[in-house]
Structures are given as structure tokens and as C-alpha cells.
Amino acid sequence: MSLNDPMLAFTDNVYKLVSSIPRGKVATYQQIATLAGNPKAARAVGMCMSKNTNPKGIPCHRVVSSTGLLTGYAFGGIVKKKEKLLQEGVYFVHNRVDLSRSLWQK
DNA sequence: AGATTGACCGTGT
DNA sequence: GACACGGCCAATC
């Protein structure tokens, strides 16, 4: 079975996909949802993250909104997250991720 | 089983 | 660019 296998639970796919985002890249909630099998389930993706809140296994700081804006992430503030991503080599434009360059492409 | 919630997205004004 | 509205989905009362 593969990551985008519909027989897996949606949350399972989300979990695996997010944890496989390479360092220096970011993915959008919608992208994760699409890869997980439901292009419209971007919301559900976010909920799953908030439920787990497991930075050790899930790099949720690499997941951003479609506009590249850092939504969610309450581990000390958005600013902190931005610094963290910058440190990983993610391109930023003011307060947003430059999706055209740092978007995770499978 | 029904209603509410939430780390969302797209469109229109 | 900012704000409002509606839609869509899964988890949680």
C-alpha cells in the first residue's frame, strides 16, 4: 500500500505525508489533503495536527496554508516558526513562505 | 444520530 | 490587500 492509498485512514495518510516532508521544504494543507486522497479535506488535516501536537514525529511547522501564511502553530508564536523554517533553508517573502520555490514537490 | 468545532480554501466585494 | 460568506471534511461533544 502506498501513501495515497484510500484504504488507509485519512489521518494515517496525513501523518505519514507530513512526517515525510523534507527539510527545507514546506507543504500546504490542501496539498497534504490531496495526497491523502481528499483534495477538499484541508480542514480535517489541520484538525488532525492540533489533536496530535506531536512535533517530535510530525514536523507540523512545515505545513502552511495555501497562501504560504503560517497559520496555527502555537508553540511560542508564528515568528518562532518563521525563524525555524528560515534556518532549514525555506525561502520567505516578508511573513509568508515563497511557495514557488519552497513548496514540497513529490 | 445530530450539532458543533477547527492549525482551511476559493470567490466576491 | 483586507474583509465577509459559503462550502467541504473529519474529529469531538
Image: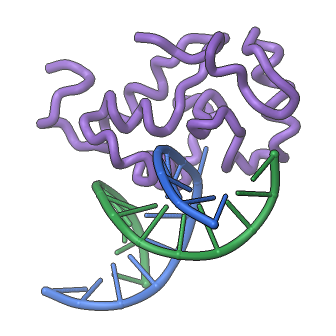
Chain colours: A purple, B blue, C green
Q: Residue at x 40, y 26 (%)?
A: A17
Pick the residue in front: A94 or A24: A94
Count the numbered circles shown: 0
Quarter the N terminus of chain A occupies: top left
- Whether residue A51 appears in this view of the structure is no
- Whether residue A80 appears in this view of the structure is yes
Q: Is residue B3 above or below residue B10?
A: below
Q: Is residue A98 left or right of residue C7?
A: right
Pick the residue in front: A51 or A65: A65
Q: Position of residue A37 (x, y in %)?
A: 25, 35
Q: Is residue A6 above or below residue A2?
A: below
Quarter the C terminus of chain A occupies: top left
Q: Is residue A103 above or below residue C7?
A: above
Res. A95 image quadrant: top right
Q: Is residue A43 above or below residue A78?
A: below
Q: Residue at x 27, y 41 (%)?
A: A38
Q: Is residue A32 left or right of residue A71?
A: left
Q: Is residue A13 left or right of residue A97?
A: left
Q: Position of residue A82 (x, y in %)?
A: 81, 30
Q: Residue at x 23, y 43 (%)?
A: A9
